[in-house]
Amino acid sequence: MNLFWIKSGPLFPADTGGRKRTLGMLREISRAGHHVTYLALKPRSLQISDEETADSYATVKNWVDWDESPRGSAKFFFELGINLAFSSRPYVLDKYRSRLWREKIATGAAAADVVVCDFLTPAPNFEGLKLSKPTVLFQHNIESQIWKRLASTAGGGLKGFYLQNQWRRMLRWEERFSKEFDGVITVSPEDSDFCRTHYCLQNVLGDVPTGVDVDAFRLPGQSASLCIGFLGSMDWMPNVEAVLRFMERILPLIRGTLPEVRIKIIGRNPPSSILRLATTIPLVEVTGTVADVQPHVHECSVMVVPLMAGGGTRIKIFECMAMGVPVVSTAIGAEGLPVRHDKEILIEDEDEGFAVAVIRLLTDRSKAHDLASNARALMEEKFSWSAAATRFVELCSAACRTYGVGEASATKSRNG
């Protein structure tokens, strides 16, 4: 199969869940003998790394130069204002509109069997395009649900107004864009059900499992001290909100019993609100970007995922499980993952219950060991990127058969 893969940026460094999922799957898709042409935006000032160039995830890699306004800059706030005043789309979709990118999508599609839009962000560039090949939207998250959950916890004021506004826009446009594709692939049965039920989509092809490269992760030695870890990209708003909630509402409950427990926040690009935690709260470390997360995760006795917003599935939970460190999560944090409470993970939503679960694993090392061992065994037995890639290709093949690729009808326009 010849896949034309459209994404909003390079895959290296592979330091976000979305990049890791795409990279893991594309490597396996290419290894299986399929031809992948990768087309993505590239910030004009960014030099593509040698690692990206050399990696075998795609046969051909093409880049479209793009100017992104730095978050917090005058131009960034100007664009926000223009978006609020003159557009009905959410800013996080409007910002990725590119005339040159759209033209390259249109011309490159002719040589493909299927065109894959990876995440919703490139979708505005597909609007109104009359492509002669089937198109598939790969939804790593249900974006509207992320914004809904963020808006519900934002309170009033300017921030609350903005998040409510963006959520309503995302809800409308996610449904609209999803209906423009010949097929939609999600990463969990729950997300597929949401698309069918709330968006009334008739084009949901199914879901692909989340994978993890178990062989790339080693088991930890004996943890020398009490340490709680959080792993995740710290330039993603749900992660920032989760960490701030944990530090404000849950950590004091834990330190009431274990006053010397350390906190380690592991993730790229922490904003000032996260950086301040290391200077205002004792025994808190904010690592920022690290070359290898494993040594940092292995310092931790427990990993926490206190998310109250998000979508899709959490690769970071699978990675922590593969690294042999027990996990405490909210239900939203573990949403879409086939893990069992008190077997491979502890799941608690309320602040007090979450704190009790963390204390339990910090003080009962036998329980922590059993939980971590069960989780690692599950990863080894059932989850791999190969399985995810195989499933993805099967679903793309189904889209091609439905569309008629290889038959006379393959030459017709999707909208014609």
Image (cartoon, rainbow, N blue to C red):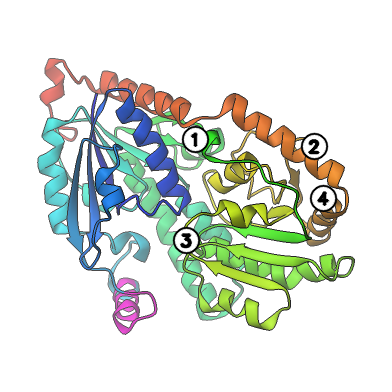
Which residue, given by chain and number where applicable, does mark 2 sit on?
Answer: 370
How far apart are the two marked residues, 4 and 1, measured between alpha carbons? 34 Å
Q: Is residue 331 above or below residue 114?
A: below
Assign the magenta stretch its main secondary structure. helix
For this view, does 96 lie left or right of residue 258?
left
Instruction: State the residue at coordinates (32%, 27%).
Output: 31
- Of the numbered discs 4 and 2, the one sitting upstream in the chain is 4
- Of the numbered discs 2 and 1, the one sitting upstream in the chain is 1
For label 2, the SS is: helix
Amino acid type, label 3:
Trp
For this view, does 379 lie left or right of residue 178?
right
Q: Position of residue 294 (x, y in %)?
A: 57, 51
Q: Quadrant of residue 393?
A: top left
Which residue, given by chain and number where applicable, does mark 4 sit on?
Answer: 361
Tag 2 near tag 3, CB within 8 Å? no
Q: Nearer the viewer, mark 4 or mark 1?
A: 4
For label 4, the SS is: helix
Instruction: State the residue at coordinates (24%, 50%).
Output: 40
Amino acid type, label 1:
Ser
Q: Position of residue 185 (x, y in %)?
A: 41, 34
How far apart are the two marked residues, 4 and 2, measured between alpha carbons? 10 Å
Q: Position of residue 16 (x, y in %)?
A: 46, 53
- Of the numbered discs 2 and 3, the one sitting upstream in the chain is 3
Tag 2 near tag 1, CB within 8 Å? no
Which residue, given by chain and number where applicable, does mark 3 sit on?
Answer: 167
